[in-house]
Image (cartoon, helix red, strand yellow):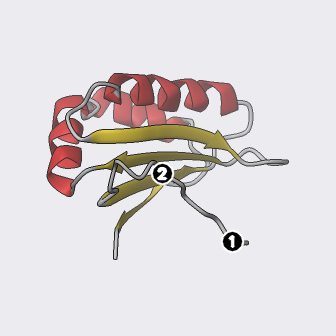
Amino acid sequence: MISFIYFSIEHLVMFVNTAFVIPTTGKENEIADVMNNFAKALQGSEGLIRVHVLKEKGGNALVGISMWENEENFNRAMARLAPSPASRSKDEAIHETPTVVRQFIEI
């Protein structure tokens, strides 16, 4: 499968963060809500270009994608919005597998 990320020419994407999640059966809506709420909380963050939460076509895997002007802005936003230990343990209970986080830089 080939995936493409398109972006406006006025923004040069320097850093992309992705999070792949397989929800526990019956918890799909709950984890989708968690991811969508986090995406909404990112809105207005310095250096954020775009943020998306996507659902696998024909499946239940979810992916969160955020595009940033640079990694420093991403790190500041994550520090500001980092979930508490209590919410992390709740999130883990609704994941079938651990979240896979991958980060990309433009080359």
Residue 79, numbered circle: none
Name the kind of residue labelled 2 in the image.
Phe
Number of labels in the image equals 2
Direction from residue 46 to residue 66 in the image, left or right: right
Q: As rendered, which of 45 and 39 lies closer to the eye?
A: 45
Image location (x, y in percent) of residue 55 = 68, 42
In the visual, does 60 lie left or right of 3?
right
Asked which secondary structure carries label 2, the reply is loop
Q: What's under tag 1, amino acid-wise? A: Ile
Residue at position x 73%, y 48% in the image: 56
From what the image shows, is residue 107 above or below residue 16? below
Q: Nearer the viewer, residue 86 or 50?
A: 50
Q: Which residue is mark 1?
A: 2
Extreme front residue here? 10
Q: Where's residue 54, x and y in %?
A: 62, 42
The residue that appears at 21% across and 56% down in the rendered structure is: 71
Query: How dense is the environment of label 2, judged by Cα within 10 Å: few (below 14), some, or many (20 and up)?
Result: few
User: Is 107 in front, or is 84?
Assistant: 107
Residue at numbered disc 2: 7
Q: Which numbered disc, 2 or 1, marks the residue closer to the eye? A: 2
What's the distance in space between the residues labelled 2 and 1, CA to CA? 17 Å
